[in-house]
Image (spheres, rainbow, N blue to C red):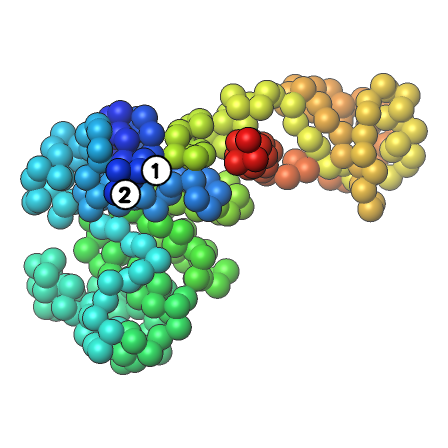
Amino acid sequence: MAELEVLNVCAGYRGRPVLRDVNLKYGTGIHVLLGPNGAGKTTAFRVFAGILAPFEGTVLVDGADPNARAEVKSLIALATHRSALAPRLSVVDNLRYWARVLGLPPAPSEERIADVLDLLGLTRLADRRIGSLSRGQNQRAGLAKALLGQPPILLLDEPMSGLDPATTDRLITWLRTWADQGRTIVVSTHALADAYRFADDVTVLQAGRVAGRGEPAALRSALLGSAYRLRIRGSGDLPAVLDRLGHRYERQPGAVVVEVPDEGAAETLVADLVSEGIGVREVVPARNPLEDVYEQLQTEGASRDAT
């Protein structure tokens, strides 16, 4: 297990800050850094990896500063949108080169290379030159490079953006296994569905600042309050019963959406509907708990930009 700690970090480019007053501590698990484009996610990853030194504050990896001790960087692997692979070499030759850089023995490294190629759907492209790949294929090759060394800290910047659904599912399973083995994995994304599917916790980054952190549902409650929007499908005159029970609702095709204050109120509502003769077929969140948070942060960001 390796721990990543960020203390009072302010960082950016050419004297202009992108990150401000960032304080975070990540240990074993899958941690999602969530935010809209321009929130500072890529800059944060460059700082976490020791590539970009902060203007102020400190980054610690197992208590050591990667900007002061270069050997600490070997504990971290970073996959970004740009793979930084040699364009004239094939995918597999690039991975063999990085296996030697990482000090992997030849026989195990070949097996590991085959594993990551298969995981990311690159087996048929193994002999293709990096320079001939599409942007999405190139990104997958860079992700393969990051996974190759199985480091204790893995930083993945928008890793699912170039993947098909089947490859995404395989990658999530792989990451879950790694996290359960004690690794620290930080994944940035602006895709709410991805964050909700596999995150142990979510850090929301907005305009370079940490706007909140927690489990998806708890984070929504902390930032926006505890109301839940439920989509309910059932037989019978559902709107009439909701009117009689005093609930406001929104009609949707084949369903209604009702807002309740908390999970207990949701259970009470379902029981009341059943007692009123409604055959309840489905009760699900109207959207995942992060969507309201995301929408609110984007609205706030747009308002600030307009002033």
> How many residues crowd mark 2 within 10 Å: few (<14), some (14–19), many (20+)?
few
Give the SS element for disc 2.
strand
In this view of the protein, can residue 240 be seen by the observer? Answer: yes
User: Residue at the location (76% across, 29% down)?
Assistant: 258
Q: Is residue 234 above or below residue 135?
A: above
Distance from the alpha carbon under mark 1 to that under mark 2: 7 Å
Q: Nearer the viewer, residue 11 or 290?
A: 11
**CB under 8 Å between discs 1 and 2:** yes
Q: Amino acid at mark 1?
A: Val
Q: Quadrant of the N terminus?
A: top left
* Left or right placement of residue 27 versus residue 221 in this view: left
Q: Which residue is mark 2?
A: 13
Residue 76: x and y in percent read: 20, 46
- Dot 1 corresponds to which residue? 18
The reply to whether residue 289 is visible in this rendering is no
Q: Is residue 181 above or below residue 143?
A: above
Establish if 71 lies above or below 296: below
Q: Position of residue 140 (x, y in %)?
A: 35, 64
Choose top left, top right, bottom left or bottom right for residue 227.
top right
Query: Which of the labelled discs sits on residue 252, or is there none?
Result: none
Secondary structure beneath disc 1?
A: strand
| Viewer-proximal residue among 239 and 157 | 157
Residue drawn at 45 percent across, 34 percent down: 206
Position of residue 267 in the picture relative to residue 3 (left or right): right
| Residue depicted at 8% across the width and 37% down the height | 68
Residue 170, image quadrant: bottom left
Q: Residue shown at 16%/69% (left/top)?
A: 96
Mark 1: few, some, or many residues within 10 Å (few <14, many ≥20)? some
